[in-house]
Amino acid sequence: QVHVQESGGGSVQTGGSLTLSCVASGYTTTPNCMGWFRQAPGKEREWIAYKTQTGTTHYSKSVQGRFTVTGDVSTKTVYLQMTNLKPEDSAMYYCATEAPYYCTMDYTYWGQGTQVTVSS
């Protein structure tokens, strides 16, 4: 059984930093990419970042320049480094693995989420 586990969420003040961790386990193949998403109450789930097997990264406009994906997709361990956090970044953050087509959507396996709350 595939398991995806995020950790590192918490509360931080505006302008602060936080790093989330994600580990996927329970299968042996190397994913093409691993992605990060977030969802605030009453809003749709939003793709924010991904990292590929070859190490390339891509970010949504909302987080570009502030968030960075690090880690190693081949070992299924990635991180989301978040800086200059804003109240609008408050959301449940999800990690996902195994995107069959595009790294921005349709992931097969998801974590349970970790809450990030940014206050002023």
Image (spheres, grey):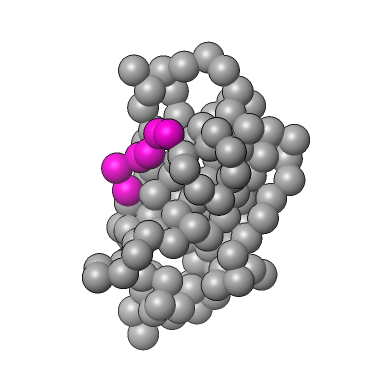
> Which image quadrant: the N terminus?
top left
Q: Which quarter of the picture shows residue 63? A: bottom right
Q: Find residue 25 and report its horizontal and vertical position in percent.
A: 44, 23
- Residue displayed at 66% across by 70% down: 65
x then y, percent, for residue 107: 46, 39
Find the residue positioned furthest to the front. Answer: 101
91 vs 119, nearest the viewer: 91
Furthest residue toward top: 28
Residue at 45%, 29% in the rendered image: 24
Residue at the location (33% across, 51% down)?
A: 114
Magenta range: 108-113
Q: Is residue 13 visible?
A: no
- Image quadrant containing the C terminus: bottom left
For residue 11, side relative to residue 82 (left or right)? left
**Quarter residue 111 falls in:** top left
Q: Magenta stretch: residue 37 in it?
A: no
- Asked if residue 43 is positioned above or below residue 10 in the image, the reply reads below
Where is residue 72? Give x, y as percent. Answer: 64, 34
In this image, 37 relative to 83: left or right? left
Residue that protrudes farthest toward the left in the picture = 42
Residue at 32%, 48% in the rendered image: 113
